Amino acid sequence: MIRSIAFLFLLAALTTTSLFAQQTKPATAGAAPSGREYRLQALYRAGIAQSYEFTESTQVVRTHSDSAKKSYLRDVKYFMTVRCLESMKGIVSVVVNLDSLTYSFTQDGLSVSYDSQKDITPKNFADLNSYMGPLNRSFELTYSPYAEVTKIGGEQITWIRDYLKDNSADMDSVLALIWNQSVADGNLLQLGDLQKRVIPGLKVAVDSSWKHQLGLRIEGIRYDDTVRSKFESYSGGFYVLRTKDTCDARRDQHVHVYGIPYVTTILEGQAAVDQTLALASTGIIQTLTQNVDAWFRGKAANETFTQRITTKNTWKLTGQYQW
């Protein structure tokens, strides 16, 4: 009996691995002609999970009102899983979990690193705290048939939000802001929503384009706007969708900026994004890459400063399995 059960698990694992290999191996078919239509929709199956590696590489240069400059570098990596709970009539519910985190920060001789699989206790470093909030706290996303997230929730993320609210009186205001924003909807969507409202869920012709909303969270700043995406190509079993546009920063939002001990108010800003999403003909998102050049002008206490940010965010499919 035990051998039979073990054989069934082995067979399921081999089948899933085989399907994944077929899905990610490029076909020999040539590129599709311009004007040919394809239905572009992410497809999820209940009981099937995808593993992704998320990487962020960021460079920042800040210029203060006296022309003094401060620069720093940050590299972040999460391993994450996206599990489908239910898929019915185009409405999909998935659970996202950020399983592990590696973090590296460098600034003028200062170096801070963290590995959640090796380090027992996180270092007391404010910038690192902004990445700790969602770590190993699952959250649920509900999608419409048109790639729009209609609901964000889940017991674990609700618990940490309630905990932070109930204990806010005992926390430093800047530290409370960091933790609250780390588990806010904008951050969860930036990390866990791979569709980014780019996939239209309709039949679309190669070389055609469409408008949609896009939200980014870059260096803690929320940028939102209506942007245009294009069905750039179909070749080898992969649809390539590209977004090249700009998003304005939300004015008057309050954020924490590294190295500033006060809450910063955003006065203005903009992000130029060049984003590419590769969707397999099976409906599985293979890669999502964001190259962003952004800036904002902020005010903290009586100091007004400008910050320029260059960041590359990449989500890469690393596996698929049954659960």
Image (cartoon, rainbow, N blue to C red):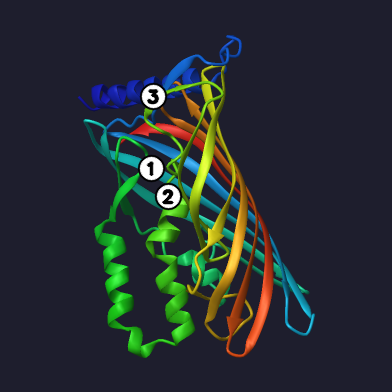
Could you say where residue 56 lies in the image, as x and y percent from the top left?
Answer: 60, 53
Q: For mark 2, what is the residue?
A: 192
First in sequence: mark 3 or mark 1? 3
Q: Nearer the viewer, residue 177 or 119?
A: 177
State whether residue 71 is above or below residue 176.
above
First in sequence: mark 1 or mark 2? 1
Q: Nearer the viewer, residue 218 or 161?
A: 218
* Residue beneath the point at 33% across and 23% down: 12
Q: For mark 1, what is the residue?
A: 82
Task: Kindly report which numbered mark, 1 or 2, lies closer to the viewer in this rendering.
Answer: 2
Q: Is residue 281 visible?
A: yes
CB-based contact (under 8 Å), mark 3 and mark 1: no
Q: Is residue 107 left or right of residue 148?
A: right
Q: For mark 3, what is the residue?
A: 16
Q: Label 1 crowding class (10 Å Cα cut-off): few <14, some 14-19, many 20+?
A: many
* Residue beneath the point at 26% across and 56% down: 154
- In the rendered structure, which amino acid carries the disc numbered 3? Thr
Residue 276 placement: quadrant: top right
* Residue beneath the point at 52% across and 45% down: 227
CB-based contact (under 8 Å), mark 1 and mark 2: yes
How many numbered marks have been drawn onto this rendered protein structure?
3
Could you say where residue 139 lies in the image, as x and y percent from the top left?
Answer: 32, 54
